[in-house]
Image (cartoon, grey):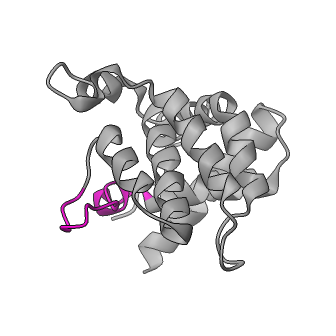
Amino acid sequence: MRQQQALTDFFAGLTEYTFHVRLGVADPSLTDYLSGLLSRFIRSDAVYRLRSLGGRPLRQVTDMFTEAEQRVGDARREAHRHIGDFTLFWVGVYPEALPHLKSDDSKDELVDFREQGRRCYDIAAQIEPSDDAQPGGELLSRLSDDYDLCAFGLREVRRQWQTPEDGDEGPLLIN
């Protein structure tokens, strides 16, 4: 539990520094959301948490979107939000993995992850959440509108954890 909290704090600090200081984007709700995304997606079961009705993890955006469209209410909102998060994570943090995710034998071969992510955040923003614990529509709209900025910022966050500053001993390592 302490390790998870340390990673959460690490991502929160890096995300805040990157967006507020380096990019000049002082938007605490946006940076909190993005650092939370990084903390959640440490675990692959969170990256692939969207499942078919049969319980099979969905690994392709095309399948996720088909599943999301079959849902209603909060379930539909959460599925579309997850697709936005999924695409933003890969486009922003690990863009070098996109060719593998969109290989010739993949249903996602022709999917534009950026456009699909923007679209799904926008769809999720239009569905009113049933409780206040879920991100509001305004935040999801900002994620849609500022998708490329968020992706760039997440790439910078990754660069920060991989590239130590002069005199810095490098990224935090937890045993």
Q: Is residue 53 left or right of residue 157?
A: left
Range drawn in magenta: 41-57
* Residue 43 magenta: yes
Q: Nearer the viewer, residue 169 or 35?
A: 35
Q: Residue at x 25, y 61 (%)?
A: 52
Note whether 150 is above or below 1 in the view shown. above
Residue 96 visible to an observer of this rendering: yes
Where residue 7 appears, x then y in whole percent?
Answer: 49, 63
Residue 38 visible to an observer of this rendering: no
Q: Is residue 170 left or right of residue 58?
A: right
Q: Is residue 164 left or right of residue 54?
A: right
Q: How many marks?
A: 0
Where residue 58 appears, x then y in whole percent?
Answer: 26, 52
Where residue 76 appears, x then y in whole percent?
Answer: 50, 61
Q: Main secondary structure of the magenta part?
A: loop
Q: Residue at x 18, y 61 (%)?
A: 56
